[in-house]
Image: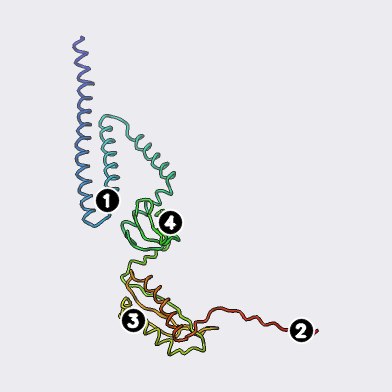
Amino acid sequence: MENLDIKTLIDTYLIPWGINIALAIAIFVIGKFFAKIITNVIAKLLRKSDMDSMLVDFITSILRTVLLLFIVIAAMDQLGVNTTSLVALLGAAGLAIGLALQGSLQNFAAGVMLIVFRPFTAGDFIEAAGIAGVVEKIGIFSSTLKTGDNREIIVPNGAIYSGVITNFSARDTRRIDMIIGIGYDSDIRLARDTLQTIIAADDRILKDPETRIAVSELADSSVNFIVRPWVKSDDYWDVKFDLNEKIKLAFDDKEIAIPYPQMDVHLHKQAS
């Protein structure tokens, strides 16, 4: 009778449980092996598409975690564990975490979009979220910009991607827009010739497209010229600053007046 009970125990519990445990272990080991292969293949495909390495590592890490989670649930299901409640619990936990980290998830999604679509890259000079500076690093949640006075500003990616992005480094060339005013008593032809001479003498100014010099407005106190030379993007600020100085010095030498705002006060003496 005792031998029969032991045999029944073995047949009823030990053998089925042993088989289930072995199958669960096999599911976990084989699943983990295939999960590694899948993540490696996807990582290679993403790297071949010139995707940012940081984003590739992040995506493969998430994929590996999700696959392992499914493998663990499948192994537990093989052991007879009720995984329906576990999946529901994980879903509720994920929803709660998502609501708690709503702002962070928005920044993460924006970071992914910035890395994938690349409206700018590290080293570009941009203006976004009210900040102008050189991009030093594009992170998953935030980007780092360096301003002209060497300040480091960390901007959330959500603020960048949700607004207008101006990339000053996206094109090889840029146009300098200047307005130069001269007095009504000054010689317009002499002013135009002087501006053309200054432009022609600067080798950094491109010949094509041609520089535009024209009278744009007869203003209240000045005749305004537009001066629009084209330069390489890297030379933009140096050329603009140099032109301001050269034009002022040349106009002074040729006695071409540059008017400035002034107020005339007239005093009237009232008879007693």
Mark 2: secondary structure: loop
**Coordinates of residue 249 in the picture (x, y in percent):** 43, 80
- The 10 Å Cα crowd at callout 3, few under 14, some 14 to 19, many 20 or more, is few
User: Tag 3, which secondary structure?
Assistant: helix
Residue furthest right as drawn: 272
Nearer the viewer's eye, disc 2 or disc 1? Answer: 2
Residue at 44 percent of width and 84 percent of height: 253
Q: Position of residue 4 (x, y in %)?
A: 19, 12
Question: Which of the labelled discs sits on residue 77, or is there none?
Answer: none
> Does the CB distance between marks 4 and 2 fall below 8 Å?
no
C-alpha distance separating marks 2 and 1: 84 Å
Give the SS element for disc 1.
helix
Badge 1: residue crowd in 10 Å (few <14, some 14–19, many ≥20): some
Q: The residue under label 2 is which amino acid type? A: Gln
Of the 4 image quadrants, the one containing the N terminus is: top left
Three-letter amino acid code at the position of disc 3: Ala
Disc 1 marks which residue? 56
Residue for badge 2:
270
Residue 272 versus residue 235 in the image, above or below: below
